[in-house]
Image: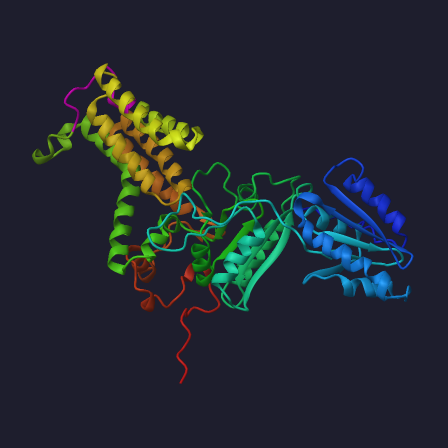
Amino acid sequence: MAKTNNKVPVSTNITKNQKYMEQKVGLDVSFDAGFRELVILKKKVQLYYVTGLCDTAFIQELMDKLIEINDFESNMRKLPEIIENRLVHQQVTPVETMDEVVDQILSGLVAVFVDGGKKAYIIDVRSYPGRAPQEPDTEKVIRGSRDGFTENIIENTALTRRRLRDERLRLEMLKVGERSKTDVCVSYLQDVADEGLVEVIKQKIEEIEVDGVAMADKTVDEFFIERKWNHYPLVRYTERPDVAASHLLEGHVIIMVDTSPSTIILPTTFFHHMQHAEEFRQAPSVGTFVRFIRFLGVFVSMYLLPLWLLFVLDPTMLPKDLSYIGPNEEGNIPIMVQIVLAELGIEFLRMAAIHTPTPLSTSMGLIAAVLIGQIAIDVGMLSPEVILYVSISAIGSYVTPSYELSVANKLTNIILIIAVGFFGLKGLVIGFLIHILYLVQLKSLKTPYLWPFIPFNPKAMLHILFRIPIPYANTRPSIVHPKNNYRQPKSKS
């Protein structure tokens, strides 16, 4: 966020401070801009706050303690020191500029001015409206914690701190947006995370110049990750505190943005988007099996339909044992067009389910899929085999843990289908090579997107393919350049 050098200091004349606050905050216009003036030892003391972002009980207690000063104190000269000692809260910060006072008030804190004082006292009594932590809908597990990040950044940092009670865990708060002044927290382990990585991330966040980040983490992501028109996700989102804590232990950096329940994990690779917490909640053998099934589903979502279309267009490529593959009835529409129409139909159903009220979305999706699919077959618009393979491909996309990756794979799937439809085998081969080369050249904060496959790292690739038992997973991934590569402390003699 762009910073101005003209800082207005807190005036010793409390009337000037009041006029400044009226102009900047709109005390006489905005109904939620709270203001209370008290007279303590014959001097004015003013409190400023935003009613919807503060806990009323704390404000009442503050005023009670301030009014009691009239009964027990008489030294007017030391009134600022007396008031600072009577502010009954664990976090009281003196500030010297009016700009910072305004920013803190609009963030949900209370500002206290004392006539004749050169500082304002900021008390953190914010109480953001929001929901209780609950399990994220997109990252459910059979066993494991049921809490999840919320739209409250204070709760999110607490959920992280609860899992990592390490004095070296750092939670640095920044602000983004000239108007929104949104809180952005950069979280990392001081003795593990690479200092260069942390500094690059903080610098990129501080360089963001925008009036507001209404879309929260997504807006921040698009400013400091140069993706342009790339459709593959270069950061990983998670709403699970245990997943975020696990990545912090590996040496990653976590970015939390206020008003968003999702946190950003950096840096990430293609294979990070294919991991799920469920794999680590099961036995290593079961987790490995689940991981292989998930890999299969991801590749099916990208390559099944183009490959099947190739066999339909050129049945001579099939061995005799697989000669049954292909539609028994071609229908009135070319197969490629049928597949594209079916894929678009799946997307229509998905978007309709999202925008339909929850009690109706499941039944609506099932009924619409069955009725539309059957009618399309009856009228000769689609063949049964097209419905079958498109459904399998759609299931593969839903198996993908990362929603962003599943949508990107869907676009790749459609592009490959069109390439095969027009150019046959050459289209598939060239399209596949372009896809791989495209992924190879992608980087997330200078991190190769296909690591550890390209460039190849055998030990890291083993950890990608198999769910290694935790006692044997004692090293951190080299891709994050951790300061401390060994994860488990040495046993004490």
* Side of 245 where 279 appears, left or right: left
Looking at the figure, which quarter contains the C terminus? bottom left
Magenta stretch, overall SS: loop
Q: Nearer the viewer, residue 469 or 38?
A: 38
Residue visible at 82% across and 41% down in the picture: 22
Q: Quadrant of residue 223?
A: top right
Q: Which residues are magenta?
A: 326-339
Q: Residue furthest left?
A: 320
Vertical placement of residue 36 versus 459, above or below: above
Q: Residue furthest front?
A: 71
Q: How is the image coloured?
A: rainbow
Residue 87 on image: x %, y %:
75, 61
Camera-nearest residue between 425 and 176: 176
360 horizontally vs 213: left or right: left
Q: Is residue 454 visible?
A: no
Image quadrant of residue 121?
A: bottom right
Q: Nearer the viewer, residue 472 or 46?
A: 46
Where residue 203 appears, as percent x and y from the top left, is: 61, 53
Query: Residue placed at 80% from the left, 48% from the top?
Result: 36
Q: For residue 479, which quarter of the picture?
A: bottom left
